[in-house]
Every structure is written in structure tokens, then in C-alpha cells.
Image: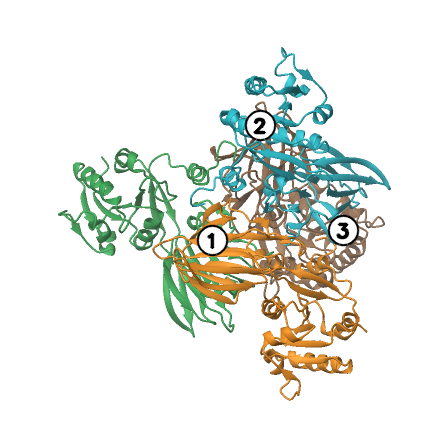
Chain colours: A orange, B green, C brown, D cyan
Amino acid sequence: MNSSFQRIGLISKYGATTVGATLRRLIEYLQARGREIILDSSAAEHVPDTRLSCVERQALAARCDLVIVVGGDGTILNAGRSLADAGVPLVGVNLGRLGFLADVSPDLMTDQLDQILTGEYAQEERALLHATVQRDGETLSTSDALNDVVIHKWDVARMIELEVRIDERLLNTQRSDGLIVATPTGSTAYALSGGGPILHPSLDAMVLVPICPHSLNNRPIVINETSTVEITVHAGDYTQAQLSCDGQVNVALLPGDRVSIRKKTHALKLIHPPGYDYYEILRRKFGWGKTS
Amino acid sequence: MNSSFQRIGLISKYGATTVGATLRRLIEYLQARGREIILDSSAAEHVPDTRLSCVERQALAARCDLVIVVGGDGTILNAGRSLADAGVPLVGVNLGRLGFLADVSPDLMTDQLDQILTGEYAQEERALLHATVQRDGETLSTSDALNDVVIHKWDVARMIELEVRIDERLLNTQRSDGLIVATPTGSTAYALSGGGPILHPSLDAMVLVPICPHSLNNRPIVINETSTVEITVHAGDYTQAQLSCDGQVNVALLPGDRVSIRKKTHALKLIHPPGYDYYEILRRKFGWGKTS
Amino acid sequence: MNSSFQRIGLISKYGATTVGATLRRLIEYLQARGREIILDSSAAEHVPDTRLSCVERQALAARCDLVIVVGGDGTILNAGRSLADAGVPLVGVNLGRLGFLADVSPDLMTDQLDQILTGEYAQEERALLHATVQRDGETLSTSDALNDVVIHKWDVARMIELEVRIDERLLNTQRSDGLIVATPTGSTAYALSGGGPILHPSLDAMVLVPICPHSLNNRPIVINETSTVEITVHAGDYTQAQLSCDGQVNVALLPGDRVSIRKKTHALKLIHPPGYDYYEILRRKFGWGKTS
Amino acid sequence: MNSSFQRIGLISKYGATTVGATLRRLIEYLQARGREIILDSSAAEHVPDTRLSCVERQALAARCDLVIVVGGDGTILNAGRSLADAGVPLVGVNLGRLGFLADVSPDLMTDQLDQILTGEYAQEERALLHATVQRDGETLSTSDALNDVVIHKWDVARMIELEVRIDERLLNTQRSDGLIVATPTGSTAYALSGGGPILHPSLDAMVLVPICPHSLNNRPIVINETSTVEITVHAGDYTQAQLSCDGQVNVALLPGDRVSIRKKTHALKLIHPPGYDYYEILRRKFGWGKTS
């Protein structure tokens, strides 16, 4: 058996009652194969009686050879942002509903992990975005996103006006409900609801999708992942905007704030069982039948 | 000259510095034609030295034969909601930029008003929507809209889940950023940005447009204006939703709140100069050239 | 039992092998209830050994009180165009796959027809379109459509240029792959693929949907069913266009040809089993789940 | 002065009456700068009295250091397909209307060519697609496209059914009016009308855009330019499909025909005046104003 995945970290969805059983099966399975197991607090809360070591997520990432995340795509988004820097690969076990990221099903879990632990797997790199908010020349906040960085109007039923620059060149000044900047991973999430295209995960690209743009010919644009996107919130009487990363981190933006978005240096290493087929996941998630 | 428009009310955009000059020209013009003029406070603030009577908007609507609104479409939306019940017709003078509703231009104002005052004009009825919010069986608020009633997620980067019923029959339960219910008048405003169709003003219809729907086959649907739309906000951990009418009136909604939307009994009487051509306004607003 | 549906016509899909069994069950059922049955040739071909009278479709429409169509929506579209003028109501039995129009399922057929024959049913009127092609001032052809009239480029990979007038007023001159003019019935067919909205069947409206328009702000527009749409094919070196009605009738168009489309005087009377719910059909056809 | 562009080929739009004057100015300008000029027949027809040598387009590409194309984007598409293999760079002079590819305006032509001839210019590579049609195991035809390869239904108002594979993996089987496979260059042409995103020219990608797909959740997908797309036309009673490259080359397809599309080995070298700004062209072509 492959010795590279000896120390395995477990992370899971918070608060989901169905997680416990899967997690216990997983622990039993890994112990039977002689793996060292480390939990973070999200996993530990589901197995309160365990004697396994429980550490902070950063420490877990630093000490493990592989992290198994039990939950949905949201759980993986959350874990992925924490783990990318450490370079530890991640595999996702879903809770019965196929995810784009969590593609090991509980039913096939032991067979598929057998393969992964013996070195039979597909590994791919998923880019993250890094967003920096500048106010009055100072950095107000930084945050990462595996799916998308979204600048969205807030609280009022008015459009916001955003000036968008790519690599220091003006793209346009647009009035809309907001703007989504998504990775290929995020292209099948919120960006798709906003009318964006699907980007194959192997593409070195990001996509800008305007949300309900005032101008009907303001369209999604796919740009190189090496580009830097700068978005400035224009002044307005009642403008209120916020920044979200993967729908979870929020910063309130003021007129004049400048959000700079670029690809994060480290990508997330995502592991799939052998035979991983992105198109099959698309077909199943979107119900593309024989004649879709 | 036609005697039907003897007492004329003037309403204008608040705070716009360009309004004053147009308003003074208009007052001079109407006085020269022996019309009685009544202002509301929005108009009076631009001509502080006038001796014209200034009354509340409801009183103005009750006492006048015609109301001239100086401003953009937003000003007319605002005035229209106040005036519809009184049944007084309204004509809109724009401030240099053609509006869908404010279609008298300052340049042609005196000529076009000459025609209107002598009875040469086109009158149409524009339907309004009436929204009622019910909480725990009690009416929380009511409001009117000439463009649209919008239920929108609020403050957080999550979708809301709405159950939509039409005439007491389930349409669907949808997850989205929100739902727009628009009149034909509103179909060229926010609903269009959300992907809705243009509805000709003469249509007895309203359109439901989902905002960034999670399901890709959730599409705009046009229904009869006699229908009642009921939207229930579903419970969720972090759901926060708000109700807006014409982007101006806001009510915070809680899970379980039920918004009932139906056509208002009284329509707005909107007056246009003779030769009014809705399609020409579409062409100019959307830049449909010879070969659009 | 209601005596109004005594003479019943049967029409079916041509060539479908699964039709025969359903048709035989239907004949047996109707004979057991003492109904007189008349076939057209489409039905007769499936029951060659029958002694039932078989007549032309127009004669069938004239002599029957009710026509039952066995097949899919395509079969009903075809029959509906023939039957609308005669005013005979039509009910559709599908072949196992729910249709928008053919909503009686073979499994529930006898129960649902029991109800219909005793007068328990919902009847609605579905508007048809009537298209006239004028060339050099003469009428070249006329045709009817229950779904849509489509003007489409033909044979070459170039856009066509169409001048569109509504009630003699210019809407626009557009370059596109073509233009769909659809009834509410047709709004869930080709027009939907082209990006059009769903129109509730009770709407007195038609919708114009441009196909792949060159101009990004050329959008679907819903107009009153009382309007007349006139489309002129513009001259071009290689322009080739064709006219289709419900995807079945074709006329080759030349530059300068003018297609006039208006609502047909007679609507189709469509009968549904009691409890007919249009929204339920939408949900089932589009897979709108609990949380679509 | 830079000696690299000594022998310059001229290609122009066929039949356009406005080309002649620009071409003469161009010849005069180049002769004054001591350049050797070679024409192809498209240019020669506009200057019938010239003593310049006129050769076949392939020979011109082989012998020249630079080719100047006078015309619109269509002329450049045509020339680009011929010139890519030879590796000769191309610059486009438009006829007064800015093109995505023809971005030297007649007014600024001499100044901008001064810069280009002295080595001040921006050069980029634009990928082409290479399409192969296989029938019964044999190659029926091959063709190149700078914008797009389109498989489109032909002559009848029915959808076609296409099976799409990417790198030998099934993407889906789709019913639609057709499918566009576009380069970044083609993303602002027909693919955009079909609802596709804009792809920045520097992206190593192609985009698949379904035309009026039957399934509402069949969406544009952007894939890696190293991928091979295989499209098989499914059998159907009346299926008729055709293949177009850049809207100009046509092959009639039969059920069972397999179209294989991959990136062409040689890209087109496209030269722009210094200061070339793709986003500015987007803004001008799409009318993105200050507040689009």
C-alpha cells in the first residue's frame, strides 16, 4: 500500500446530524488500515467520545498527508480555503447528494478510499482567488475564495455603479446589482445563476459575470487567470455594497473602496477516485438526459 | 381651447438643480394661458418666491384636472403612486433625457402642452400593483407599485427560498436572489435586467422574473393581470428578505411572511403628446438602430 | 350522462406503433358507452379491421361533438389547426409522456373520459395565428399555427435582416437567425428555447422572440393578441429565408416578401379532465422540484 | 527604419467600391517608403492599371514579410485562414467602421503604419480551429475557422440531435438548432448572439454554445484549447444538418457523420498599432458608455 497518505485529517460539516454515522465508519475504516487520524473541531463535535487528537485547522493541514472532508460542497469550500496554503490534498465525501467537489459517495466510500490509499486516484489543482480591499490607500481586509468573489449591492433596492479594470486597463463602468468574479470551480455555482458560462476546471481562467446589469449588452467575460481585476465602488447618495467570498465572508464597502482580485499563489489539491469524469458530474447535476 | 384642464398641479424632482428653470418656464407658460396652478412641496422648493398655492400631494390630486410632473421616470413613478387613486391624469416633462414615462422634452414643452391643453393628446391607463404583507395572520403593511414589487434577499450572500402561488395554485418553490413581479410599465426597468421580456403597456398582464435563480430552467412567466400572486418566504437559518416597491419602499420580511400581490383597482391615467409611439421610445432607449 | 358528446371523432399520430392498442381500448370504451365513433385516416390506419366510418378530417370536424386525439403535442398541433374553424372541442390522450396539450394519460383514460362524457371537464380556448405571405402585392400563401409562426434563415450561415412592424408602426429592423411569433400555447415550445418567457394560456397575447439576434439588446416582446405583426424580409445578396408554422408548413421567402401575422378568428376549444392545473404541468415538464 | 517588413502583400475586400481609394493611398504610401508590394487578385481588381506583381494568395503569403488586409472583419477572417500556415503577420485596415480584427482606421493609416514599419506594434497570436468531417470511417472534408465551426440544422424547422464528446468523453446528447464551437476571436461574433460569453483573445480556450437548445439548462461551456471536440449527428427521419466555418464554408452532413474539431497547429499572427486595447474595442463595439 502507498505510504504517502499515513496521517489523515478529518473535517466535517458543522451541525449536520447525518455526519456522525459516516464519520464513525470512516474512523473505523482508517484505523483498520493503520492510519493515524487527526480531527479538527468540526469533526470532533460529532464523535465526542473519541480519543483521537483534535487540533486547529491550520495545524491539521500542516501535519496531515491527506484531509478527508465529510459534507457538501459548502463544507469543502470552507476547508479548501484553509488548506490550500499548506499544500495538503483534500478529498470530499458527500452525504448522499453528489457534489461538484464532494464526489465520494458514502455508499462507495470504503472501496474508493481503498483505491485512493493505494495511490490510485486523480489529482487536480483548483485555483483560488485572493481579494484585497483598499480604502484610502490602506488595506482594509484580505480574503480568499475557491468559488467566487462577489461585490453586491446591500440593503437597498438600487443598482450600484462599479468601475472595472483588468490589468490596469478600463473594462467598463457598469450599473448592476453587483459583479461576480468566479474561478472555474465557481463557474457552476452562483456565476451560473447569474448567466455565466461553465468553465472546465483545467482552464487557467476566471469569469466576470454582472448581476442584473442595467445595460443589456453587458455580458460575461472570461479572462486569463494571470490577470488582476480591480473594482472600484463609485460614489452615490445611497450606495451600499458588500464583498462576499464563497458567500461566507462579508465586508461592507464604501464609495471609493477598491477591491483587487487576483489568483492566489497556491492552488487547492483536490483528489478524486479513479475514473473521475467532470462531464458526468455536469450531466448528473444538470439533469442532462440522453437528449438534453 | 379645451376647458377640461383648467386647474393644473405641478410636481417635480426633489433637489435637482436643473428643475428650477424648466419649472419657471412652465409656470409662465401656464399663467399666460390663464390656467390656475397648484404646487406641491417638491415643486415649491424650486420656486421659493412664488405666490402660487402649495398643498399636500393628496389635496393637489383631488383639486387638479391635470398634473404635470417635471423630472425623470423615477419622479413620475413616485407621483403616479400618489395620484392613481384620485384619477387625475398625469403628463411627464423630462429634464433632457427621454424617459419611458416622461416623454415631453423641455425643448418641445410649450408646443406639446399647447396640443395637450387643446385636447389633442393620447391617454392610456397604466396598471399599478398592490402588495400586502401578512405576518401571523395580520396585515403588516400595504404598498403600491407602478413598476414592480420585488422580494429580494437582504444583507447576506445566500439565496432565499420562496413559495409562489398564483390564484391559490402552486407555481413552484424556488431558490434565488429574489423575485420581481412587474407591470408592463415595469417590464422595461429592473425586470428587464433580470432577463424578463418587454410587455406592451396595453397588455393586461404582469410578469414574474426570478433573480439569479438556482435552477436554470426557472424562467420568466407572464400571467393575467386579474391573477393574485402569493409569495411565502420559507424558513431558513439565515434567511433575510426585504420587500421593495418601485425600488423605494422597504419592508423587512421574516420567514413565514406572506406577500400578496394583485392589480390595484385604479390605474394611472398617463397623457402623451399626440403622435406618441411606444416603439419609438423602445428604439431610442435601447439604441435599436436601423439594423439592431 | 351528458348527451352533448354523442358523436366522437378519433384522430391519432401517424405511424406510431404504440397508438394501436390505446386506440382499440378507446374504441371499445366509447362503444360500451353507446357513442357513435368516426375516424379519420390517421386513426383508421391503426385499426384496419374496423367497420367504423372513416372520413376526411374536415368532415369529421363538422360531424362530431368532440374529437379525441391520441398522440403527443405534435399530433394535437396538427389536428388543432384543422379543427379550430369547425368549433368542435378537442381532448388529447398522450402515449405515456405528459404533454402540454395531451394531458389525458392512457392509464387514467377511462376514468377521465367518464368524467368528461358526463360533463365534468375544464374547457379553455387556445388562440391560433394566421399568417399571410404577400409577394409583389399578391397573396402567395396563407397558413395557421397553434404554436408559432417562424421566419428563419435558410441554408446559409448568414443572418437575415427583418423589418418588423406592429399595427403599422415600426418596431425595429433586426439582423438575426430569424424571428418567432408565438401564441401562449407556443410559448413553452420553440420560443422558450429562443429565450422567450412563458405566457399563461389565458393571456390575450403573443410574443416575438428574436433567434440569435445580432444586437444584444434585442429582447423578446409580448404584445396584445389584437395586434397585427408585419415582417418584411430585406434584400441581401444571399438572403434566403423560410416561413414555418408549428414547424411543419414551409414557404420559401424572397427579399421583399411581407409576412402578416394576426390572431385567427376562431380559437381551438381544448378540453381537460377536471382538476386541470397548468402550473402542475409546467412543474412536471420543467422538473421544477420542491426547491427548483 | 526596421527592415523586417520589406515585402508587403495587399489583400482587400472583393467588390467593395470604397476599397479602391484606400488601396491607392496605401500603395503610394508604401512605395514612398521603398517597400516592395505584392497584390493578390482581390486587391488587383481595385487597381487594374497597376504594374505591381499579382500572385495567388498562398504565394503572396510565402513571399511577404507582412500582409495588409483592407476591409472588414469578414475580409480578415478570410485572409487569416489562408495566411496562418505561412506564418506571415497580418494587419487590418478597416473601411471606416472599427472591427475587432481590422483596427487600423483609414484616417490614421499612414501614422499607424509608420509606427508598425519602424517596429512599434503589438503582435498577438489568434488560434484557429481545424474541423474534419468523417463519414463511414473516411475523411469527407477538412476546413479551418478563425471565428467558429458551426453545425446547424438545415432547411427544416426541426431540431437536430447531436452527441458531443470532449477528449473522447461524453459531454451530452443535445437537441437544438445547432452548436457553435468558437475561438476567443469568434466569441464576439455568432457565439455571442447565441448567448455565449466573451473570451479574452489571450485565453487558450474555446467555447461551445448551443443554439436554441431544447433543454433550458444546456449552457455554454468553455474548455481548454488542447481539447478535441467530437460531434456526431444523430439519425432522424428528417434530420438535415450543415457545417459552416466562419459562416463561409459549407458541408452538408448526414446522420452518423462525425465532426472532429481541434485547435489548428499554426495560429494567426495579428499585428496592431501600439496602444492596442482590446477592452476599448469592446466598449466601442458594444456601446458600453461611462455607465453601461
Horizontal relation, residue D91 to residue B119: left or right: right
Residue to which mark 3 is pinned: D167
Q: Is residue B170 visible?
A: no
Q: Amino acid at mark 2?
A: Leu
- Which of the chains bears the disc numbered 1? A
Q: Position of residue A268 (x, y in %)?
A: 64, 64
- Which of the chains bears the disc numbered 2? D
Q: Residues within 10 Å of mark 2 (few under 14, many from 20)?
A: some
Identify the residue at image location x=64%, y=16%.
Answer: D45
Identify the residue at image location x=81%, y=74%.
Answer: A1
- Label located before the other in sequence (2 or 3): 2
Secondary structure of the residue carrying numbered label 3: loop
Mark number, residue D117: 2
Quadrant in the picture for residue B246: bottom left
How far apart marks 2 and 3 lie (CA) works out to: 43 Å
Q: Residues within 10 Å of mark 1 (few under 14, many from 20)?
A: many
Secondary structure of the residue carrying numbered label 2: helix
Q: Amino acid at mark 1?
A: Ile
Q: Is residue A105 visible?
A: yes
Horizontal relation, residue C186 to residue B264: left or right: right
Between D80 and C10, the one lying in front of the other is D80
Q: Residues at badges 1 and 3 in contact (C-beta under 8 Å)?
A: no
Residue to which mark 1 is pinned: A231
